[in-house]
Amino acid sequence: MPDTQREYDRRGALGPAIAKATGHLLNKFTGRGPTKAHTFVSDELISVVLSDTMTTGERSLYRDGGAQLVLALRKAYQQAMGPELIAAVEALSEQRVIAFLSANHLEPDIAIESFVLVPRAAADGAGENQRDGAKAHADGARTMARPPLPS
């Protein structure tokens, strides 16, 4: 099989696998998974768009004017889930995640989990200087420190 076909087959299976893993982890941490999850895969970025993620309690808080409380709660969930989400994406994609970004929108109820990857061509060490520990960014994104992937 030509390399381009093998890469197409790998990516074709990768998106649904990452969507499933992300939905499973969301359910594990919040008690409810999304009704829809769609993954976009490129060489340096994987993004998962999740729909209908809020729990009944979060919906009630939102309706009663607690939008900021719901967003703060979601941010806490995402920080707690981050290491497991990163581990799942790294295992499935066989690429190192150098940054994890997560955001929520309440109306409509949509969440996005994005993973910036070390490009395959740079995986031989060019991206190593970017993994010097967890770093907070002004927009709330975090770069998570990760141990090396097994060979």
Image (cartoon, rainbow, N blue to C red):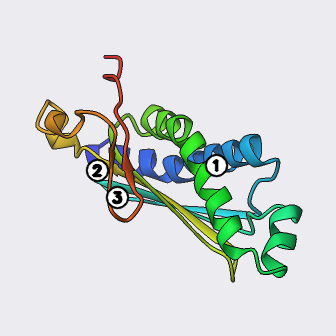
Taking the spot 19% from the left edge, 35% from the top edge, the residue there is 123
**Residue at 76% across / 54% down in the picture?**
33
Mark earlier in primary sequence (2, 3): 2
The residue that disc 2 covers is: 4
Label 1 sits on a secondary structure element that is: helix
The CA distance from mark 2 to mark 1 is: 38 Å
Where is the C terminus found, in terms of image quarters? top left
Q: Which comes sooner in the sequence, label 1 or label 3?
A: 3
Q: For mark 2, does the 10 Å Cα neighbourhood hold few (<14), some (14 to 19), or many (20 or more) residues? A: few
Residue 77: assigned label: 1
Per the image, the residue denoted by label 3 is 42
Q: Looking at the picture, how far across and down is residue 142, in whole percent?
A: 38, 49
Distance CA(mark 2)–CA(mark 3): 14 Å
Q: Amino acid at mark 2?
A: Thr
Q: Which residue does the image show at 63% across and 66% down from the upper left? A: 71
Q: Amino acid at mark 3?
A: Ser
Q: Is residue 43 above or below residue 103?
A: above
Name the mark nearer the viewer: 1 or 3: 1
Q: Could you tell me how far apart the alpha carbons at marks 1 and 3 are, in whole angstroms?
A: 26 Å
Q: Residue at x 63, y 43 (%)?
A: 21
